[in-house]
Amino acid sequence: MLYQSDTDILFPYRSIAALRHLRGPIWQQLVNRICQHQDETHLEVLAFMLLMIRQNNCLQCFPHNYRAMRGCTICAQQVIERSRYTDEELVQMWEAICIELKEYSSASNNPDIHHVR
């Protein structure tokens, strides 16, 4: 059981907007772009969430550790604020993940991922 109401197993969609003003204009543009999608299964949203899962190391988080007790939003904010990557590098990582997901969804014919049109 997770004790913090803002704690999920993986980085949640609802935390994306809280990351907007933590970095420069390039990062803010990316977050704005992602927040425009109302559908959590949009490829760009999934790519952003996977970027955050990798940056936050969500797969190593468990209910009784400090990060989980603080919640996903605070954890993600702290990771983004302290990231050694530039905004440009983070956007490049996101773009690479978009390509990765496109290839995965094409190979698996996954109808649950909505492609960028």
Image (spheres, rainbow, N blue to C red):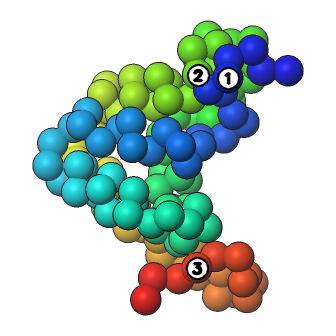
Q: Nearer the viewer, mark 1 or mark 2?
A: 1
Residue 114's mark?
Answer: 3
Q: Secondary structure at mark 3?
A: loop
Q: What residue is drawn where x is 71% and y is 76%? A: 112
Residue 54, can we see it?
no
Query: Distance of mark 3 from mark 2, alpha carbons?
Result: 28 Å
CB under 8 Å between callouts 3 and 2? no
Left or right for 5, reference 38: right
Indicate whether 19 appears above or below 7. below
Indicate whether 53 appears above or below 66. below
Circle 1 residues within 10 Å: few <14, some 14–19, many ≥20: few
Query: Distance of mark 3 from mark 1, alpha carbons?
Result: 29 Å
Residue 4: image location, x then y, percent:
68, 17
Q: Examine the image and state in which quarter residue 86 appears.
A: top left
CB under 8 Å between callouts 3 and 1? no
Q: Examine the image and state in which quarter residue 117 appears.
A: bottom left
Circle 2 residues within 10 Å: few <14, some 14–19, many ≥20: many
Q: Earlier in the sequence, mark 3 or mark 2?
A: 2
Left or right for 52, reference 2: left
Residue 71's mark?
Answer: 2
Which amino acid, by three-letter code, is at mark 1?
Ser
Q: Secondary structure at mark 2?
A: loop
Residue 8: image location, x then y, percent:
69, 34
Circle 3 residues within 10 Å: few <14, some 14–19, many ≥20: some
Query: Distance of mark 1 from mark 2, alpha carbons?
Result: 7 Å
Q: Examine the image and state in which quarter residue 20 appears.
A: top left
